Image (cartoon, grey):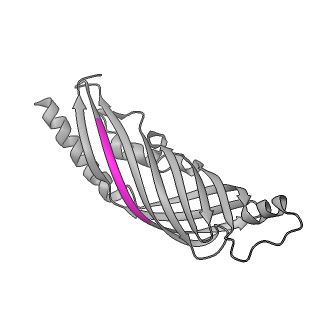
Amino acid sequence: MKLASQVRKSGARNAGWVAAAFCRCIASAATLLASGAALAEEADAGAAPAATALPARGSVFVDPLGFLLFGPTLGAELGIGQYSVVGYGRWLDGGLVAKSLFESSTDKFTFSYGAGLKGRYYFGQGLAGPHVGVVFEALKTRTENHTDRIATNNLVMVPELEGGYRLGFGSFLVGATLGVGYALQVSLIPSRSI
């Protein structure tokens, strides 16, 4: 009986998380690793770049403000022309908002993480300026109820749409992104393994 009650409580809490969790604003600082123009100058100092070549750029980024939201994030981005692909990972239980959505007086939010892929289109060149994109993120969460000795593991898939703006400061990029998505609970696995 306690196990069924725990599953119902966890499901209700996740429904609230579904509605609120992924309207988020992420501020990220990115460090530019390489640009197509710089690589072309190093490879052929005297040769003119081809007229049809698209500039390629890459960056790595960290989102330390994630400690306030849905966990700190580390990722990498590779772009060609106005398109880019982003891969990232997040430490979900490190964020204050994430903790408030999963923890209760009896449940403890333990090590949880996420990973995702983004496809972005920039309206300007050089991975800067306004952008829009699609995101797919997978989250693995765990809550533990030490009173009932139950641990609940969740697998959540989150499709999102995002938009944002990024400013370039030399080799550094700073931007903000707003993403809206829906968290789909794929599995809820209660166990007595605490």
Residue 9 relative to residue 154: left or right: left
Up the image or down, 69 lies above or below 24; here it is above
Tell me: 126 left or right of 170.
Answer: left
Picture residue at 77% right of the left edge, 60% below the top: 39
> Is 159 colored magenta in this rendering?
yes
Q: Quadrant of residue 187?
A: top left
Q: Which SS type dominates the magenta stretch?
A: strand
Q: Residue at coordinates 69% horizontally, 68% vertically from top-left?
A: 55
Residue 47's x, y, as percent? Answer: 85, 69
Q: In x, y percent, where is residue 143?
A: 32, 35
In this figure, what is the number of numbered marks?
0
Residue 120 falls within the magenta-colored stretch? no
Say which quadrant the C terminus sits in. Answer: top left
Determine the residue positioned at 73% across, 64% down: 36
Q: Nearer the viewer, residue 87 or 28?
A: 87
User: Looking at the image, which residue sits at the far left?
Assistant: 1
Examine the image and state in which quarter residue 41 appears.
Answer: bottom right
Name the residue rendered at 46%, 45% in the picture. Answer: 96
Q: Which is more toward the observer, 21 or 169?
A: 169
User: In the rendered image, which quarter contains the N terminus?
Assistant: top left
Q: Position of residue 19 (x, y in %)?
A: 31, 58
In magenta, the rendered stretch is 153-161
Front in this rendered view, residue 162 or 176: 162
Residue 3, percent from left and from top = 16, 31
